[in-house]
């Protein structure tokens, strides 16, 4: 073999080695295209090829959601609306009442104000442990044939090792079924209670309003009781101070029957008179405040106004079969898209690996034949 022949064979070998199969080049170019170049048809083609998955999986999820909706127990939501009631204003003058409230606040005594209770406060109290515990201990008719009244704790079938643990578990369970909403533009509070029986849901909501009103009444009466105690103590001190001021004025008048005409005595008489007037004004204000506190202490006026009492709902709030089926179809569609995407990626990876293997074998076979010819050995016989 001449040098020219060896050079030509080497060039042919290099050209074969560095010239992959055209199909392999097209596959590589297709794999390197960016996501922005992929057309809508190319995105929909895998879905069309797997139309059975596209139709079957959403239908399966929809039927599964419908079956779950039929199996789940029905729940009913009763709703009631209320608003804070204005507490009657005190008969005291604004300045005197503000002064007493400020003085009581400095001494750590809470005083009842003449403003309305905050709607946000009512919403928080409705879901407080105090109200929920009292509701659990109240008796209701569970809708059984014998119409026997049972504590709500027993109706909800709350379990626990001890009564305290059972009550704590019941509070958490009842809290999950109670929702409150506050409309700050109108000050209206909406209470919603969910139960398995429509009448039971309405009874629980109305009972919670009664407990809320009792709680607020007790709170207001307790504040008025504290205010009456503080005012009584201050009234005793003001009465003693008034008597001391009047006694000092009396001693001055007895010692100076004719004080007019003397600038010094007239100044002293005016000072004593101002002291008596001041002590008397404080005393009169405290007497009025004490009477008002005693009245508020026994006042049983409701502090909330019920706009709409809860009535048994005619339709269940959950489960909702139509909504659940639509959600099932949507979830099935999402699952189909994810599954088709994964299958398409797996198929592309398999095709790419097959093309690379095929191109490698095609490039390897001519090179092996030329190497055998160059070494003077022909291909082995088929029988060996």
Image (cartoon, helix red, strand yellow):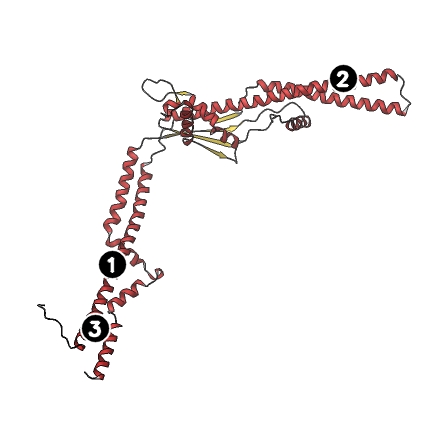
Determine whether, in the image, residue 208 is placed left or right of residue 272: left
Q: Is residue 224 visible?
A: yes
Q: Residue furthest right?
A: 261
State the mark number for residue 72. none
Horizontal and vertical percent for residue 144? 33, 21
Q: Residues within 10 Å of mark 2 (few under 14, many from 20)?
A: some
Determine whether, in the image, residue 275 is placed left or right of residue 58: right
Task: Tell me: residue 375, above or below residue 310.
Answer: below
For disc 3, the marked residue is: 367
State the mark number for residue 243. 2
Residue 79, image quadrant: top left
Secondary structure type for disc 1: helix
For disc 1, the marked residue is: 350
Report the quarter where the N terminus lies: bottom left
Task: Tell me: residue 58, above or below residue 238.
Answer: below
- Sequence-wise, the earlier of marks 1 and 3 is 1
Horizontal and vertical percent for residue 312? 38, 26
Question: Contact, CB < 8 Å: mark 1 with mark 3?
Answer: no
Q: How far is mark 1 from mark 3, CA to CA?
A: 26 Å
Q: How far is mark 2 from mark 3, CA to CA?
A: 129 Å
- Residue at position x 30%, y 35% from top? 69
- Sequence-wise, the earlier of marks 2 and 3 is 2
Q: State which mark lies toward you, 1 or 3.
A: 3
Determine whether, in the image, residue 339 is placed left or right of residue 187: left
- Residue at position x 21%, y 82% from top? 5
Secondary structure type for disc 2: helix
Question: Contact, CB < 8 Å: mark 2 with mark 3?
Answer: no
Residue 173, image quadrant: top left
Q: How far is mark 1 from mark 2, CA to CA?
A: 107 Å
């Amino acid at each position: 073999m001449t040098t020219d022949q060896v050079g030509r064979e080497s060039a042919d070998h290099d050209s074969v080695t560095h010239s992959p199969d055209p199909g392999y080049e097209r596959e590589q170019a297709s794999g390197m295209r960016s996501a922005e170049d992929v057309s809508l048809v190319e995105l929909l083609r895998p879905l069309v090829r797997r139309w059975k998955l596209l139709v079957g999986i959403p239908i399966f999820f929809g039927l599964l959601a419908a079956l779950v909706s039929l199996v789940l127990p029905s729940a009913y939501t009763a709703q009631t609306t209320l608003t804070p009631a204005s507490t009657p204003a005190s008969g005291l003058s604004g300045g005197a009442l503000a002064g007493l409230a400020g003085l009581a606040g400095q001494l750590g005594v809470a005083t009842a104000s003449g403003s309305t209770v905050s709607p946000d406060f009512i919403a928080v109290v409705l879901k407080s442990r105090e109200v929920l515990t009292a509701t659990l201990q109240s008796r209701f008719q569970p809708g059984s044939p014998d119409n026997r009244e049972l504590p709500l704790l027993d109706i909800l079938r709350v379990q626990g090792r001890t009564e305290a643990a059972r009550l704590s578990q019941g509070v958490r369970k009842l809290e999950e079924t109670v929702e409150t909403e506050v409309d700050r533009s109108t000050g209206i509070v909406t209470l919603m209670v969910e139960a398995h029986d429509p009448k039971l849901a309405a009874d629980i909501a109305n009972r919670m309003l009664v407990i809320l009103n009792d709680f607020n009444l007790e709170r207001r009466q307790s504040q008025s009781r504290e205010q009456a105690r503080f005012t009584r103590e201050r009234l005793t001190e003001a009465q003693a101070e008034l008597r001391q001021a009047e006694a000092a004025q009396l001693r001055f008048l007895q010692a100076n029957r004719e004080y007019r005409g003397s600038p010094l005595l007239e100044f002293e008489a005016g000072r004593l008179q101002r002291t008596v007037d001041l002590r008397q004004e404080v005393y009169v204000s405290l007497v009025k405040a004490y009477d008002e506190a005693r009245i508020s202490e026994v006042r049983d006026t409701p502090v909330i106004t019920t706009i709409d009492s809860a009535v048994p709902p005619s339709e269940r709030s959950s489960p909702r079969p139509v909504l659940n089926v639509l959600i099932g179809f949507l979830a099935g569609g999402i699952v189909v898209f994810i599954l088709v995407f994964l299958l398409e990626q797996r198929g592309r990876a398999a095709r790419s690996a097959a093309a690379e293997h095929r191109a490698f074998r095609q490039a390897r076979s001519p090179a092996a034949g030329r190497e055998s010819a160059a070494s003077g050995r022909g291909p082995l016989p088929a029988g060996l």
